[in-house]
Image (tube, rainbow, N blue to C red):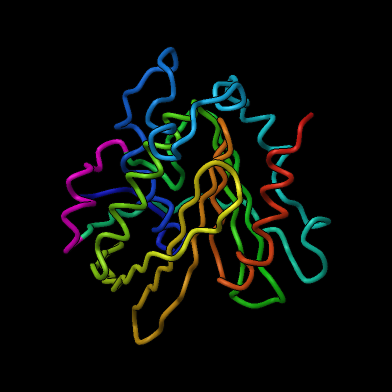
Amino acid sequence: MRVRVATTALGITAALLAVPACSTDTTDTKPDTAASARTGKPADAAQQAAPLTSAALETRLLDQSDLGNGYLRKPERPTQNDDVTVIGCPALSELGGDAATGGTLTFPHKAKTGFTYGGSSSGISEELYSDSANKLSEGIGRIFDAMTGCPTYQVVAGGTPIDMASQKLPAPRGLGDEQWSQLLTFSTGGRSTVVKQTAIRAGSLLLVISGSPALVDRHLDKALAKATAAG
């Protein structure tokens, strides 16, 4: 499987997460039965609400005033795309990579931001997506199942091999309608980077927070509260 992605740890993660998003073919006109089956709750009016626009999602992202001192916004940069080959993870390969072209999931409505912390390599990124509850549930659920189904695998990015390890984590309960969480370790050149990634679906909105585990835990509730605030 090959995808095009910036050769950074979080960039690789985001590209891998983009793989199956286009494979969901449930239409908006059908009831959100998959989400209901997964949660055991019937789809309610909020779940069936019209998706938010990308412009609306932008206003719901965290900013520096939400995070506090020590955080700097990561500047937008031209993306250097390299072919990334995934080795040793049939579950990811079976999902197919033709539709994965870029560093974000391929839901139609999306917004993202990222911050560094304390002048170090530590940081946090936030992505918001909006679509029908059923499409969000199916898409992100398949992604996390595939990634956590491969405890170890390898990616080759721009000719550089990166050893990957994934671990499913207990999802934070009581937040949104559905939750997913995993811990990813990227190892290359004798150095390792640990990234926690947590996704929360609340109705027709999906929040994905990635970064240093302590920062993800610190800001998850705040990010969800702002993302789901009315108005």
Identify the residue shown where x is 72% and y is 50%. Answer: 62
Say left or right for 68 vs 170. Answer: right
Identify the residue shown where x is 61% and y is 68%. Answer: 123
Above or below, comparing residue 190 to residue 129 in the picture: below
Residue 88 covered by magenta stretch: yes
Pick the residue in front: 190 or 223: 223
Instruction: Please state the extent of the stretch shown in magenta in the rendering.
Output: 87-99
Task: Find residue 159 and report its horizontal and vertical position in percent.
Answer: 25, 66
Pick the residue in front: 86 or 29: 29
Task: Find residue 28 and report its horizontal and vertical position in percent.
Answer: 44, 17
Above or below, comparing residue 138 to residue 200 in the picture: above
Say left or right for 154 vs 63. Answer: left
Residue 107 covered by magenta stretch: no
Identify the residue shown where x is 28% and y is 53%. Answer: 146
Above or below, comparing residue 55 to residue 18 in the picture: above
Place residue 21 in its image quadrant. Answer: top left
Identify the residue shown where x is 69% and y is 38%. Answer: 228
Task: Find residue 202 and report its horizontal and vertical position in percent.
Answer: 58, 38
Say left or right for 228 vs 65. Answer: left
Above or below, comparing residue 78 to residue 171 in the picture: above
Task: Find residue 29 and report its horizontal and vertical position in percent.
Answer: 43, 12
